[in-house]
Protein backbone atom coordinates (compact mmCIF):
# COMPACT_ATOMS: atom_id res chain seq x y z
CA UNK A 1 0.00 0.00 0.00
CA UNK A 2 1.31 3.45 -0.89
CA UNK A 3 2.16 5.92 1.83
CA UNK A 4 -0.65 8.30 0.90
CA UNK A 5 -3.18 5.48 1.30
CA UNK A 6 -1.72 4.52 4.67
CA UNK A 7 -1.79 8.10 5.89
CA UNK A 8 -5.35 8.57 4.69
CA UNK A 9 -6.35 5.50 6.71
CA UNK A 10 -4.35 6.84 9.62
CA UNK A 11 -6.24 10.12 9.47
CA UNK A 12 -9.39 8.24 10.49
CA UNK A 13 -7.68 6.63 13.45
CA UNK A 14 -4.61 8.79 14.10
CA UNK A 15 -3.62 7.24 17.43
CA UNK A 16 -3.77 3.66 16.21
CA UNK A 17 -0.35 2.11 16.93
CA UNK A 18 -0.63 -0.40 14.10
CA UNK A 19 -1.37 2.24 11.47
CA UNK A 20 1.39 4.51 12.74
CA UNK A 21 3.76 1.56 12.64
CA UNK A 22 2.68 0.73 9.10
CA UNK A 23 3.32 4.32 7.99
CA UNK A 24 6.73 4.28 9.63
CA UNK A 25 7.70 1.02 7.92
CA UNK A 26 6.71 2.45 4.55
CA UNK A 27 8.70 5.64 5.07
CA UNK A 28 11.71 3.68 6.29
CA UNK A 29 11.59 1.44 3.24
CA UNK A 30 12.15 4.49 1.04
CA UNK A 31 14.98 5.87 3.17
CA UNK A 32 12.89 8.69 4.66
CA UNK A 33 14.18 8.03 8.14
CA UNK A 34 13.05 11.30 9.73
CA UNK A 35 9.48 10.68 8.62
CA UNK A 36 9.77 7.11 9.86
CA UNK A 37 10.98 8.31 13.27
CA UNK A 38 7.86 10.44 13.72
CA UNK A 39 5.50 7.56 13.10
CA UNK A 40 7.53 4.97 15.01
CA UNK A 41 7.52 7.26 18.03
CA UNK A 42 3.77 7.64 17.79
CA UNK A 43 3.41 3.87 17.49
CA UNK A 44 5.51 3.46 20.63
CA UNK A 45 3.76 6.13 22.66
CA UNK A 46 0.21 5.23 21.69
CA UNK A 47 0.93 1.50 21.85
CA UNK A 48 2.62 1.61 25.23
CA UNK A 49 -0.26 0.01 27.13
CA UNK A 50 -1.78 -2.13 24.39
CA UNK A 51 0.76 -3.08 21.70
CA UNK A 52 3.93 -4.11 23.45
CA UNK A 53 5.79 -5.73 20.59
CA UNK A 54 4.97 -2.83 18.26
CA UNK A 55 6.17 -0.30 20.84
CA UNK A 56 9.35 -2.27 21.51
CA UNK A 57 10.07 -2.79 17.82
CA UNK A 58 9.41 0.87 17.13
CA UNK A 59 11.99 2.01 19.66
CA UNK A 60 14.61 -0.26 18.15
CA UNK A 61 13.65 0.93 14.67
CA UNK A 62 14.07 4.55 15.79
CA UNK A 63 17.57 3.65 16.94
CA UNK A 64 18.34 2.14 13.54
CA UNK A 65 16.95 5.22 11.77
CA UNK A 66 19.21 7.52 13.77
CA UNK A 67 22.17 5.25 13.21
CA UNK A 68 21.61 5.57 9.48
CA UNK A 69 21.66 9.36 9.82
CA UNK A 70 25.14 9.15 11.40
CA UNK A 71 26.60 11.16 14.29
CA UNK A 72 23.61 10.74 16.64
CA UNK A 73 25.19 8.17 18.94
CA UNK A 74 23.62 9.37 22.17
CA UNK A 75 20.19 9.14 20.61
CA UNK A 76 20.85 5.69 19.17
CA UNK A 77 21.91 4.30 22.52
CA UNK A 78 19.09 6.10 24.34
CA UNK A 79 16.44 4.54 22.11
CA UNK A 80 17.85 1.07 22.64
CA UNK A 81 18.04 1.63 26.39
CA UNK A 82 14.40 2.69 26.40
CA UNK A 83 13.43 -0.49 24.56
CA UNK A 84 15.37 -2.59 27.05
CA UNK A 85 13.79 -0.83 30.00
CA UNK A 86 10.36 -1.38 28.47
CA UNK A 87 10.72 -5.12 27.83
CA UNK A 88 13.85 -6.21 29.68
CA UNK A 89 13.28 -9.91 29.15
CA UNK A 90 13.72 -9.72 25.39
CA UNK A 91 17.12 -10.27 23.78
CA UNK A 92 16.96 -7.98 20.74
CA UNK A 93 17.72 -4.75 22.57
CA UNK A 94 20.74 -6.23 24.31
CA UNK A 95 22.11 -7.40 21.01
CA UNK A 96 21.71 -3.98 19.39
CA UNK A 97 23.28 -2.26 22.38
CA UNK A 98 26.14 -4.72 22.43
CA UNK A 99 26.71 -4.21 18.70
CA UNK A 100 26.50 -0.45 19.16
CA UNK A 101 29.31 -0.61 21.72
CA UNK A 102 31.30 -2.97 19.53
CA UNK A 103 31.16 -0.45 16.70
CA UNK A 104 32.40 2.23 19.09
CA UNK A 105 35.18 0.07 20.52
CA UNK A 106 33.65 0.04 24.01
CA UNK A 107 34.60 -3.56 24.68
CA UNK A 108 33.50 -3.97 28.26
CA UNK A 109 30.07 -2.50 27.50
CA UNK A 110 29.82 -4.73 24.44
CA UNK A 111 30.72 -7.81 26.44
CA UNK A 112 28.45 -6.96 29.35
CA UNK A 113 25.32 -6.34 27.31
CA UNK A 114 25.95 -9.48 25.24
CA UNK A 115 26.19 -11.46 28.46
CA UNK A 116 23.04 -9.89 29.91
CA UNK A 117 21.21 -10.65 26.68
CA UNK A 118 22.34 -14.26 26.80
CA UNK A 119 20.98 -14.54 30.32
CA UNK A 120 17.49 -13.90 28.93
CA UNK A 121 17.34 -17.15 27.02
CA UNK A 122 14.78 -18.77 29.31
CA UNK A 123 11.89 -16.90 27.76
CA UNK A 124 10.50 -17.61 24.32
CA UNK A 125 9.01 -14.26 23.39
CA UNK A 126 6.55 -13.51 20.65
CA UNK A 127 7.98 -12.64 17.26
CA UNK A 128 8.46 -8.98 16.54
CA UNK A 129 6.34 -7.45 13.79
CA UNK A 130 9.38 -6.34 11.78
CA UNK A 131 13.06 -7.03 11.38
CA UNK A 132 15.22 -5.09 13.85
CA UNK A 133 18.53 -6.57 12.64
CA UNK A 134 18.62 -9.15 15.42
CA UNK A 135 20.10 -12.29 13.88
CA UNK A 136 19.20 -14.60 16.75
CA UNK A 137 20.95 -15.75 19.89
CA UNK A 138 24.16 -16.46 18.00
CA UNK A 139 24.49 -12.72 17.45
CA UNK A 140 24.95 -12.22 21.18
CA UNK A 141 27.54 -15.00 21.29
CA UNK A 142 29.34 -13.37 18.39
CA UNK A 143 29.46 -10.00 20.18
CA UNK A 144 30.70 -11.71 23.33
CA UNK A 145 33.44 -13.43 21.36
CA UNK A 146 34.53 -10.27 19.58
CA UNK A 147 34.66 -8.11 22.70
CA UNK A 148 36.11 -10.89 24.82
CA UNK A 149 39.24 -11.03 22.70
CA UNK A 150 39.85 -7.32 23.27
CA UNK A 151 39.31 -7.79 27.01
CA UNK A 152 42.06 -10.39 27.29
CA UNK A 153 39.77 -13.44 27.16
CA UNK A 154 41.50 -14.91 24.11
CA UNK A 155 40.75 -18.56 24.87
CA UNK A 156 37.10 -17.90 25.63
CA UNK A 157 36.84 -15.86 22.47
CA UNK A 158 38.40 -18.53 20.28
CA UNK A 159 36.22 -21.24 21.79
CA UNK A 160 33.07 -19.19 21.23
CA UNK A 161 33.99 -18.54 17.61
CA UNK A 162 34.62 -22.23 16.99
CA UNK A 163 31.35 -23.18 18.66
CA UNK A 164 29.53 -20.70 16.49
CA UNK A 165 30.96 -22.26 13.34
CA UNK A 166 29.22 -25.50 14.34
CA UNK A 167 25.86 -23.73 14.57
CA UNK A 168 23.42 -22.68 11.88
CA UNK A 169 24.33 -19.06 11.33
CA UNK A 170 24.14 -16.65 8.43
CA UNK A 171 26.88 -16.56 5.80
CA UNK A 172 27.71 -13.01 6.80
CA UNK A 173 28.51 -14.08 10.36
CA UNK A 174 30.30 -17.25 9.25
CA UNK A 175 32.64 -15.30 6.99
CA UNK A 176 33.32 -12.75 9.72
CA UNK A 177 34.11 -15.45 12.27
CA UNK A 178 36.48 -17.23 9.88
CA UNK A 179 38.18 -13.93 9.19
CA UNK A 180 38.54 -13.20 12.90
CA UNK A 181 39.97 -16.63 13.60
CA UNK A 182 42.51 -16.17 10.82
CA UNK A 183 43.49 -12.79 12.23
CA UNK A 184 44.21 -14.23 15.67
CA UNK A 185 46.09 -17.13 14.14
CA UNK A 186 43.67 -19.80 15.29
CA UNK A 187 43.09 -22.91 13.20
CA UNK A 188 39.67 -23.11 11.56
CA UNK B 1 -12.15 15.13 13.23
CA UNK B 2 -8.82 16.18 11.74
CA UNK B 3 -8.64 18.08 8.48
CA UNK B 4 -7.10 15.25 6.47
CA UNK B 5 -10.00 12.96 7.33
CA UNK B 6 -12.49 15.74 6.69
CA UNK B 7 -10.97 16.52 3.30
CA UNK B 8 -10.49 12.95 2.14
CA UNK B 9 -13.96 11.85 3.20
CA UNK B 10 -15.34 14.67 1.06
CA UNK B 11 -13.41 13.67 -2.04
CA UNK B 12 -10.14 15.42 -1.29
CA UNK B 13 -6.69 13.97 -1.64
CA UNK B 14 -3.56 13.74 0.44
CA UNK B 15 -0.20 13.83 -1.33
CA UNK B 16 3.00 13.06 0.56
CA UNK B 17 6.04 14.97 -0.66
CA UNK B 18 9.49 13.44 -0.64
CA UNK B 19 12.72 13.71 -2.53
CA UNK B 20 15.21 10.87 -2.69
CA UNK B 21 17.05 9.94 0.48
CA UNK B 22 20.35 10.21 -1.37
CA UNK B 23 19.94 13.99 -1.41
CA UNK B 24 18.84 14.39 2.18
CA UNK B 25 20.46 11.64 4.26
CA UNK B 26 16.92 10.95 5.39
CA UNK B 27 16.64 13.98 7.66
CA UNK B 28 13.58 16.21 7.82
CA UNK B 29 11.52 17.34 4.85
CA UNK B 30 9.12 19.89 6.15
CA UNK B 31 6.91 22.95 5.86
CA UNK B 32 6.19 22.93 2.13
CA UNK B 33 4.73 26.00 0.48
CA UNK B 34 2.44 25.29 -2.46
CA UNK B 35 1.78 27.85 -5.16
CA UNK B 36 0.27 27.88 -8.67
CA UNK B 37 2.14 30.11 -11.08
CA UNK B 38 1.10 32.05 -14.16
CA UNK B 39 1.75 28.98 -16.33
CA UNK B 40 -0.64 26.95 -14.21
CA UNK B 41 2.19 24.85 -12.79
CA UNK B 42 1.73 23.56 -9.26
CA UNK B 43 4.98 24.45 -7.52
CA UNK B 44 6.08 23.64 -3.99
CA UNK B 45 9.00 24.94 -2.02
CA UNK B 46 10.08 22.06 0.19
CA UNK B 47 12.31 22.75 3.18
CA UNK B 48 15.01 20.23 3.97
CA UNK B 49 16.78 20.37 7.33
CA UNK B 50 19.83 18.56 8.65
CA UNK B 51 18.00 17.45 11.80
CA UNK B 52 15.25 15.09 12.80
CA UNK B 53 12.66 16.39 15.21
CA UNK B 54 12.07 14.01 18.09
CA UNK B 55 8.72 14.53 19.72
CA UNK B 56 7.13 12.16 22.15
CA UNK B 57 3.36 12.47 22.45
CA UNK B 58 0.63 10.90 24.57
CA UNK B 59 1.98 9.98 28.02
CA UNK B 60 5.52 10.77 26.88
CA UNK B 61 6.95 7.50 28.07
CA UNK B 62 9.83 7.67 25.63
CA UNK B 63 11.32 11.17 25.56
CA UNK B 64 14.73 11.79 24.11
CA UNK B 65 17.77 12.26 26.30
CA UNK B 66 17.09 16.01 26.08
CA UNK B 67 13.36 15.96 26.70
CA UNK B 68 10.11 15.32 24.84
CA UNK B 69 10.86 17.80 22.06
CA UNK B 70 14.38 17.86 20.64
CA UNK B 71 16.04 18.89 17.43
CA UNK B 72 18.43 16.03 16.78
CA UNK B 73 21.18 17.55 14.69
CA UNK B 74 24.54 15.83 14.20
CA UNK B 75 26.22 15.66 17.59
CA UNK B 76 29.39 17.27 16.26
CA UNK B 77 27.55 20.08 14.48
CA UNK B 78 25.03 22.06 16.50
CA UNK B 79 23.78 24.08 13.57
CA UNK B 80 20.21 23.66 12.32
CA UNK B 81 20.69 24.00 8.59
CA UNK B 82 17.95 24.63 6.05
CA UNK B 83 18.14 24.23 2.31
CA UNK B 84 15.24 24.53 -0.08
CA UNK B 85 14.06 22.36 -2.94
CA UNK B 86 11.68 23.66 -5.54
CA UNK B 87 9.34 20.96 -6.83
CA UNK B 88 6.71 20.73 -9.51
CA UNK B 89 3.62 18.56 -9.12
CA UNK B 90 1.24 17.26 -11.75
CA UNK B 91 -2.50 17.67 -11.40
CA UNK B 92 -2.65 14.40 -9.43
CA UNK B 93 -0.26 16.09 -6.98
CA UNK B 94 2.57 13.71 -7.86
CA UNK B 95 6.03 15.21 -7.90
CA UNK B 96 7.49 15.37 -11.38
CA UNK B 97 10.49 17.64 -10.85
CA UNK B 98 12.66 18.77 -7.98
CA UNK B 99 15.90 20.67 -7.62
CA UNK B 100 17.80 22.35 -4.84
CA UNK B 101 17.60 26.10 -4.88
CA UNK B 102 21.11 27.31 -5.58
CA UNK B 103 21.58 30.25 -3.23
CA UNK B 104 23.90 33.19 -3.72
CA UNK B 105 27.04 33.03 -1.62
CA UNK B 106 26.62 36.39 0.10
CA UNK B 107 27.96 35.81 3.59
CA UNK B 108 29.29 33.25 6.01
CA UNK B 109 26.53 32.21 8.44
CA UNK B 110 27.34 33.27 12.00
CA UNK B 111 24.42 31.81 13.93
CA UNK B 112 23.23 28.28 14.60
CA UNK B 113 20.07 28.60 12.46
CA UNK B 114 21.42 28.60 8.93
CA UNK B 115 19.50 29.32 5.74
CA UNK B 116 16.16 30.66 4.58
CA UNK B 117 13.48 29.08 6.76
CA UNK B 118 9.80 28.42 6.06
CA UNK B 119 9.89 30.25 2.75
CA UNK B 120 6.56 31.02 1.10
CA UNK B 121 6.54 30.93 -2.67
CA UNK B 122 4.94 33.73 -4.70
CA UNK B 123 5.08 35.19 -8.19
CA UNK B 124 4.66 38.94 -8.38
CA UNK B 125 4.91 40.91 -11.60
CA UNK B 126 6.42 37.88 -13.32
CA UNK B 127 9.18 37.32 -10.77
CA UNK B 128 9.29 34.38 -8.42
CA UNK B 129 10.20 34.97 -4.77
CA UNK B 130 10.84 32.74 -1.82
CA UNK B 131 10.01 34.79 1.25
CA UNK B 132 11.06 33.42 4.61
CA UNK B 133 13.07 34.22 7.70
CA UNK B 134 16.85 34.22 7.88
CA UNK B 135 18.66 34.26 11.22
CA UNK B 136 22.26 33.60 10.31
CA UNK B 137 23.52 37.13 9.69
CA UNK B 138 24.14 38.17 13.30
CA UNK B 139 25.85 36.46 16.19
CA UNK B 140 22.66 36.46 18.27
CA UNK B 141 20.21 35.12 15.67
CA UNK B 142 18.20 38.22 14.84
CA UNK B 143 15.52 37.12 12.38
CA UNK B 144 14.22 39.15 9.49
CA UNK B 145 12.00 38.27 6.58
CA UNK B 146 13.94 38.14 3.34
CA UNK B 147 13.07 38.21 -0.31
CA UNK B 148 14.97 35.61 -2.26
CA UNK B 149 14.26 36.26 -5.93
CA UNK B 150 14.69 33.08 -7.93
CA UNK B 151 14.99 32.21 -11.58
CA UNK B 152 13.37 28.94 -12.58
CA UNK B 153 14.64 27.20 -15.69
CA UNK B 154 11.69 24.97 -16.42
CA UNK B 155 13.42 23.11 -19.25
CA UNK B 156 16.37 21.93 -17.19
CA UNK B 157 14.47 22.28 -13.93
CA UNK B 158 17.14 24.28 -12.17
CA UNK B 159 16.55 27.08 -9.71
CA UNK B 160 18.93 29.89 -8.83
CA UNK B 161 18.68 32.77 -6.41
CA UNK B 162 19.34 36.00 -8.30
CA UNK B 163 18.80 38.65 -5.65
CA UNK B 164 18.26 38.93 -1.92
CA UNK B 165 16.77 41.71 0.17
CA UNK B 166 16.52 41.70 3.94
CA UNK B 167 13.27 43.35 4.99
CA UNK B 168 13.39 45.60 8.03
CA UNK B 169 10.58 45.63 10.56
CA UNK B 170 8.20 48.54 10.09
CA UNK B 171 8.52 51.59 12.31
CA UNK B 172 10.89 50.41 15.03
CA UNK B 173 13.39 47.93 13.58
CA UNK B 174 14.69 46.77 16.94
CA UNK B 175 12.62 43.59 17.31
CA UNK B 176 14.56 40.37 17.74
CA UNK B 177 12.79 38.10 15.27
CA UNK B 178 10.33 38.78 12.47
CA UNK B 179 8.90 35.71 10.81
CA UNK B 180 5.82 34.05 9.38
CA UNK B 181 4.43 37.04 7.53
CA UNK B 182 1.68 36.02 5.12
CA UNK B 183 2.22 37.23 1.53
CA UNK B 184 -0.98 38.45 -0.12
CA UNK B 185 -0.95 36.72 -3.49
CA UNK B 186 -2.89 39.27 -5.49
CA UNK B 187 -1.29 42.35 -3.91
CA UNK B 188 2.38 42.38 -4.91
CA UNK B 189 4.82 43.01 -2.08
CA UNK B 190 2.10 43.18 0.58
CA UNK B 191 2.09 41.03 3.68
CA UNK B 192 -0.18 40.47 6.61
CA UNK B 193 2.36 40.89 9.34
CA UNK B 194 -0.02 40.28 12.19
CA UNK B 195 -3.47 38.70 12.18
CA UNK B 196 -5.41 40.04 15.14
CA UNK B 197 -5.27 43.04 14.99
CA UNK B 198 -4.66 42.90 11.26
CA UNK B 199 -1.48 44.66 10.20
CA UNK B 200 -0.76 45.09 6.49
CA UNK B 201 2.71 46.11 5.32
CA UNK B 202 4.35 46.65 1.95
CA UNK B 203 8.00 45.70 1.52
CA UNK B 204 10.18 46.80 -1.37
CA UNK B 205 11.63 43.76 -3.20
CA UNK B 206 14.69 45.67 -4.38
CA UNK B 207 15.90 47.48 -1.28
CA UNK B 208 15.37 47.23 2.47
CA UNK B 209 12.38 49.54 2.71
CA UNK B 210 9.04 48.86 4.30
CA UNK B 211 5.84 50.73 4.83
CA UNK B 212 3.09 49.99 7.30
CA UNK B 213 -0.16 50.37 5.38
CA UNK B 214 -2.55 49.99 8.29
CA UNK B 215 -3.40 48.24 11.49
CA UNK B 216 -7.07 47.34 11.82
CA UNK B 217 -8.81 46.40 15.01
CA UNK B 218 -10.28 42.92 15.36
CA UNK B 219 -12.10 41.10 18.11
CA UNK B 220 -9.80 39.56 20.71
CA UNK B 221 -7.92 36.51 19.50
CA UNK B 222 -8.37 33.17 21.28
CA UNK B 223 -4.59 32.85 21.11
CA UNK B 224 -1.98 34.69 19.08
CA UNK B 225 -2.76 33.92 15.45
CA UNK B 226 0.45 33.71 13.45
CA UNK B 227 1.18 33.08 9.80
CA UNK B 228 0.52 30.98 8.02
CA UNK B 229 -0.03 30.24 4.43
CA UNK B 230 -0.12 32.83 1.71
CA UNK B 231 -3.29 34.93 1.72
CA UNK B 232 -5.46 33.78 -1.16
CA UNK B 233 -8.56 35.17 -2.78
CA UNK B 234 -11.72 33.11 -2.14
CA UNK B 235 -14.63 34.68 -3.97
CA UNK B 236 -14.97 38.18 -2.66
CA UNK B 237 -13.01 37.39 0.48
CA UNK B 238 -9.44 36.72 1.49
CA UNK B 239 -8.57 33.56 3.41
CA UNK B 240 -5.40 32.17 4.96
CA UNK B 241 -4.37 29.38 7.31
CA UNK B 242 -3.03 30.63 10.63
CA UNK B 243 -1.14 28.79 13.33
CA UNK B 244 -1.20 29.13 17.07
CA UNK B 245 1.23 27.53 19.43
CA UNK B 246 1.13 26.65 23.08
CA UNK B 247 4.77 26.47 24.14
CA UNK B 248 5.41 25.21 27.64
CA UNK B 249 7.92 23.39 29.78
CA UNK B 250 7.51 20.23 31.77
CA UNK B 251 8.50 19.95 35.42
CA UNK B 252 12.09 19.35 34.35
CA UNK B 253 11.98 22.66 32.47
CA UNK B 254 12.22 20.85 29.15
CA UNK B 255 10.61 22.49 26.15
CA UNK B 256 7.39 21.19 24.64
CA UNK B 257 4.63 22.56 22.47
CA UNK B 258 1.33 22.03 20.69
CA UNK B 259 0.49 23.67 17.36
CA UNK B 260 -2.98 24.14 15.94
CA UNK B 261 -4.38 25.89 12.89
CA UNK B 262 -7.39 27.96 11.93
CA UNK B 263 -8.79 29.54 8.81
CA UNK B 264 -8.95 33.34 8.97
CA UNK B 265 -11.31 35.37 6.84
CA UNK B 266 -11.08 39.00 5.74
CA UNK B 267 -13.12 41.12 3.38
CA UNK B 268 -11.54 42.88 0.39
CA UNK B 269 -10.44 45.80 2.55
CA UNK B 270 -8.87 43.42 5.06
CA UNK B 271 -11.46 44.03 7.67
CA UNK B 272 -11.49 40.96 9.89
CA UNK B 273 -14.56 38.84 9.23
CA UNK B 274 -13.98 35.65 11.12
CA UNK B 275 -11.85 32.84 12.43
CA UNK B 276 -12.64 29.15 12.28
CA UNK B 277 -12.37 26.71 15.14
CA UNK B 278 -8.93 25.26 15.66
CA UNK B 279 -8.00 22.15 13.74
CA UNK B 280 -5.16 19.70 13.29
CA UNK B 281 -4.18 18.00 10.06
CA UNK B 282 -3.36 14.57 11.43
CA UNK B 283 -3.76 15.13 15.16
CA UNK B 284 -0.04 15.49 15.63
CA UNK B 285 1.00 17.98 18.25
CA UNK B 286 3.50 19.67 15.96
CA UNK B 287 2.22 20.49 12.49
CA UNK B 288 2.77 23.62 10.47
CA UNK B 289 1.09 24.97 7.33
CA UNK B 290 2.90 27.49 5.14
CA UNK B 291 1.12 27.17 1.81
CA UNK B 292 -2.30 27.55 0.21
CA UNK B 293 -3.44 27.79 -3.38
CA UNK B 294 -6.79 27.66 -5.12
CA UNK B 295 -6.90 24.77 -7.58
CA UNK B 296 -9.93 23.86 -9.69
CA UNK B 297 -12.20 25.37 -7.07
CA UNK B 298 -10.62 23.50 -4.18
CA UNK B 299 -7.92 24.66 -1.80
CA UNK B 300 -4.49 23.06 -1.74
CA UNK B 301 -2.97 23.35 1.70
CA UNK B 302 0.64 22.34 2.25
CA UNK B 303 1.88 21.45 5.70
CA UNK B 304 4.64 19.76 7.62
CA UNK B 305 4.25 17.01 10.20
CA UNK B 306 6.65 17.26 13.14
CA UNK B 307 9.28 18.87 10.91
CA UNK B 308 9.85 15.39 9.50
CA UNK B 309 7.29 14.87 6.74
CA UNK B 310 5.59 17.07 4.18
CA UNK B 311 2.19 16.89 2.55
CA UNK B 312 -0.19 18.70 0.24
CA UNK B 313 -3.86 18.27 1.05
CA UNK B 314 -6.44 18.93 -1.61
CA UNK B 315 -9.25 20.33 0.49
CA UNK B 316 -12.59 20.25 -1.31
CA UNK B 317 -14.52 23.47 -1.69
CA UNK B 318 -17.30 22.13 0.53
CA UNK B 319 -14.85 21.67 3.41
CA UNK B 320 -13.40 25.15 2.91
CA UNK B 321 -16.92 26.54 2.93
CA UNK B 322 -17.60 24.72 6.20
CA UNK B 323 -14.50 26.30 7.70
CA UNK B 324 -15.67 29.68 6.43
CA UNK B 325 -19.06 29.10 8.01
CA UNK B 326 -17.31 28.36 11.28
CA UNK B 327 -15.26 31.50 10.84
CA UNK B 328 -18.34 33.62 10.25
CA UNK B 329 -19.73 32.38 13.55
CA UNK B 330 -16.60 33.44 15.40
CA UNK B 331 -17.27 35.08 18.73
CA UNK B 332 -14.76 35.85 21.35
Image (cartoon, coloured by chain):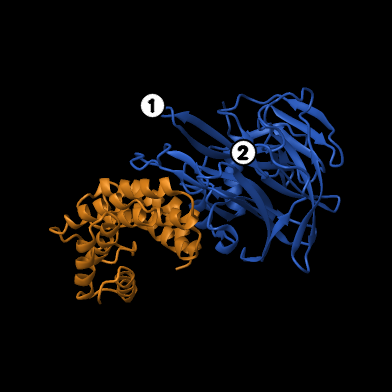
The residue shown at (48%, 35%) is: B257
Q: Quadrant of residue B90?
A: bottom right
The residue shown at (22%, 58%) is: A153
Residue closest to the eye, B34 or A21:
A21
The chain letter corresponding to orange is: A
Count neighbours of disc 1 (C-alpha within 10 A) and say few if under 14, some if 14 to 19, many if 20 or more. few
Q: Quadrant of residue A28?
A: bottom left
Element assignment for label 2:
loop
Answer yes or no: is residue A90 visible: no
Residue closest to the eye, B217 or B72:
B72
Q: Which chain letter goes with mark 1?
A: B
The chain letter corresponding to blue is: B
Judge from the rendering whether residue A6 lies leftward or rightward of residue B292; answer left or right. Answer: left
Judge from the rendering whether residue A168 lies leftward or rightward of residue B135; answer left or right. Answer: left
Element assignment for label 1:
loop
Residue marked by disc 1: B251
In the displayed structure, B36 sits above or below B219; it is below
The C terminus of chain B - image quarter: top right
CB under 8 Å between discs 2 and 1: no
Answer yes or no: is residue A179 visible: yes
Q: Which chain letter goes with mark 2?
A: B
x then y, percent, for residue B174: 73, 23
Q: CA distance from mark 2 to mark 1?
A: 27 Å
Q: Quadrant of residue A18?
A: bottom left
Residue marked by disc 2: B112
Residue closest to the eye, B148 or A101:
A101
Amino acid sequence: MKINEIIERLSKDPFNPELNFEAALEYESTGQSASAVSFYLRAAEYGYDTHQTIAYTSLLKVANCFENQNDRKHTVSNCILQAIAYLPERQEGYFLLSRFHERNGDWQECYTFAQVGLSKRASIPAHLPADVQYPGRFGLLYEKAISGWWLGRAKESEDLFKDLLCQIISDEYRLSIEDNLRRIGAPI
Amino acid sequence: MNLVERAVSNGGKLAPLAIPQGLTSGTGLMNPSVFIDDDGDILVNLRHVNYTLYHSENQQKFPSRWGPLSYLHPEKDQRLITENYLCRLNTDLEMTDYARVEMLDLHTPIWEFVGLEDARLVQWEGQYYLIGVRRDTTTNGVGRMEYTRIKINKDEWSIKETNRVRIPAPNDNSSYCEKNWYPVLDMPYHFIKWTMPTELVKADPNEPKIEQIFVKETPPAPADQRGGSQVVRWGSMYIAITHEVNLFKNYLQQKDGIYRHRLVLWDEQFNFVGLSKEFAFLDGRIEFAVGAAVFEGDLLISWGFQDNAAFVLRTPKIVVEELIKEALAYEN
